[in-house]
Amino acid sequence: MTVLLLEDEYPAAERLQRQLLQAAPEAQVLALLDSVAATLQWLDNNPAPDLILSDIQLADGLSLEVFEQAVVRSPVIFTTAYDAYAIRAFRANSVDYLLKPVKLLELQAALAKLREWRTATAPTPPAQRLEHLLDSLPRAERPYKTRFLVRHGEQLLPLPATQVAWFQSRHETTTLVAQDGRRFVVDYTLEQLESLLDPRQFFRLNRQFLAQLPAVQRLHPHFNGKLLLELHPAPSEEVLVSREKAGALKQWLEG
């Protein structure tokens, strides 16, 4: 059984690899990767493994992004530090979700479930089901996105979400504007970003803009109950919030 191991914490990766070999001595770990970017590159250049054993939080984002950006046919066992109560809801729809620190008996049980799926007449549930994990988690326990991997010339740079000022969608392109004014194109729609980012820090202003709290400098009354916003850094066009959203924006700003 070939296994791709995704984990960004080295001690946890070593421990999980030891447990894997105890639970399944025939397992062959093809690679140990710590980021979404490295995983996408590896999957693009290698045959699909028999199993992906993955932490949810990786160095540059959530491992679920891998399944949004690539066709992954391998079954997946997730490991996660989030509350065991939230995890129960997902056991019927995926191979398994193991609460950290992973226990050997739980890993053995997950591998046994994988073997049963392989011998069953029904096909393994598609990896696309895993994309619904974030939507199913209770809001207070969701692992919100904390970093973006952005292109700067010929390099890729990790940018903390705390350094984002706002996002703008224009002509089917989404631009991330950092607090220092730097601009980067990102491969997300505003709708995707709304679900990935902490709603206590980010607010969808209108169809074109999604801003982080520190970027909102001033609000000015506008006609028909709308609000005209001053953002920092300042965009090249007016940012208006509809009358319907004005109340929600004020509540968000008050905390």
Image: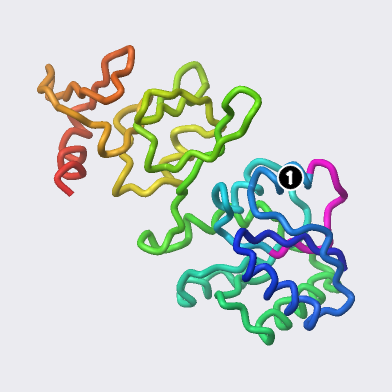
Check disc 1 and report the residue beneath it: 71
Q: Quadrant of residue 127?
A: bottom right
Is residue 232 left or right of 106 when viewed as pictured?
Answer: left
Please name the residue shown 45% across and 18% down the image: 170
Give the magenta part as a residue range. Answer: 44-53
Q: Circle 1 sits in a helix, a strand or a loop, which is it?
A: loop
Compared with residue 49, is residue 246 higher up or lower down, i.e. above or below? above
Q: Quadrant of residue 18?
A: bottom right
Measuring from the top left, give residue 113's x and y in whole percent.
Answer: 74, 77
Is residue 62 left or right of 202 when viewed as pictured?
Answer: right
Compared with residue 62, is residue 50 higher up or lower down, i.e. above or below? below
Please name the residue shown 69% across and 79% down the image: 107
Compared with residue 216, is residue 143 higher up or lower down, i.e. above or below? below
Task: Give amino acid for label 1.
Answer: Val
Q: Residue furthest top?
A: 236
Measuring from the top left, give residue 145's x and y in whole percent.
Answer: 47, 48
Is residue 101 left or right of 142 when viewed as pictured?
Answer: right
Measuring from the top left, give residue 173's x and y in whole percent.
Answer: 52, 22
